[in-house]
Image (cartoon, rainbow, N blue to C red):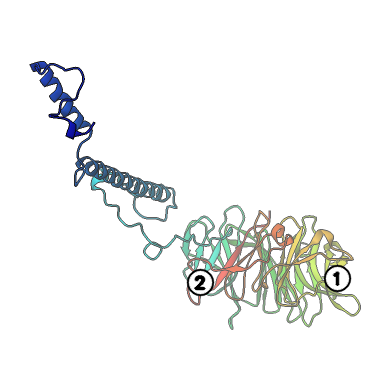
Amino acid sequence: MSNANLGDNRPGGPKRPLAVSQDELERALRDTLAGRVATPRPLAADPAGVAIRRARRSGRRRTLTGLALAGAATVLVTTGMAQLGGSAGHGGTPTVVLGDPRGFTPSPLPTAATSPPAVDPVRAELDLIIGSRLETSGGEQRDLTGVGSVERAQRVPDYGGWLVTSVATAAGRTLWWVPPNGSAPQVLLAGADAVAVAADGRQVAWRDGPEILAAGLVGGQLVATSRTTAPAGAVPIGFAGDAVLVRQPDRGGVSLWRRSAGGQPGSPERAVLNVYGTLPDGQVVGEVSAGTPRRPCLALLDPARNLTPVRTGCGPELATDGAAAVSPDGNWLLVNGARKAALLVDLRTLGAAVSAHPAGPPVVDGVAWTAAGVALHVDAAGRLVRVRPDRVVAGERPAGAPVDGVGQGERLVVVADTAR
């Protein structure tokens, strides 16, 4: 129906009363207001949304800050634990501070440039002589007052001190006894042409003028001295039991002087070039000239038969400088090869074939074996070389390592332990 047919806004049909009660008006007003609240007019800015977004951003910032501070605290705790568990060489006591995260500002961690890692000094299993001081394997240091340049040194058994032999000089060689109680070294021999000390540290032999002499060592004194005349150039080079091994001049071989029986040294075994030590059964390990053509070979020599070779093994090319030593158990020989390198020889296989393994730089002044079967020597650069037979057999090539405390121009000497 259109508005043109209407006189007012009342539709046709049944009429309704025009009177409206107060309650109905109030109810209608409430309904109108309720409808407006249910469908509010859009605002230019939503205060609630703004507040919610701000709260979310603030929450994220607090979360990230807490994570960062927790990470920094974890790093500091870890660093502190590492420092507390480090070596005793680090000075001071590390302190870890865990404070209120709101006021916490972590200090920068030390860098490698400001705190270099500690390097443990290289120590030897045996005593060392460095220049003019003695450094024991236990860490004791002693100045060797009055002792000149040292060529070799030997421990005396039963904690009886040390025997120290000088290098050869125009005045000859000097032998000192260094007491174990810390008192000054004492001269036992001076002006000797050659000095040999037994592997057990209980006997000494030396050349003095036309004679070769030998004596026992008791309490820092040479006792029960024996002497014999010897050809010019003959020198003592070691011991086989109580017998003195004497190298004859002009490659004349090696002979035995049984000083307990008196008399002269026996006839030399002319094939013997060098003597390296003895086995537990008393046989002597030496180098002999053998084969066709003649060449240096290894041999076991019988001291009861004037060093007659009883077993010979040729194979590796050997040097003839005499720088070598036998392990305490008699299983190994560290000797120089002809090609400027050391060789580790298994003496248990000595015979038609010789088992030899490259063992690092050549020996310069001698070899000292530890009771555990490790050979120590000093290479041409003055570095300490450790030769462990099991590792060498497995393919390791030993190399020299600098020793802490060795200054420029100081000579390094490994002190031989007493034979067990």
Tell me which residue sits at (15%, 17%) in the image: 16
- Residue bearing the label numbered 2: 131
Q: How many tags in the picture?
A: 2
- Asked whether 389 or 114 is in front, the reply is 114
x and y percent of residue 255 in the render? 80, 71
Q: Determine the image quadrant of residue 204.
A: bottom right
Position of 293 with respect to 316 (left or right) is: right
x and y percent of residue 325 in the render? 71, 65
Density class for disc 2 (Cα within 10 Å; few <14, some 14-19, many ≥20) is many
> Can residue 287 be seen from the camera position used here?
yes
SS for tag 2?
loop
Q: Determine the image quadrant of residue 246.
A: bottom right
- Residue bearing the label numbered 1: 314
SS for tag 1?
loop
Closer to viewer: mark 2 or mark 1: 1
- Asked whether 139 or 187 is in front, the reply is 139
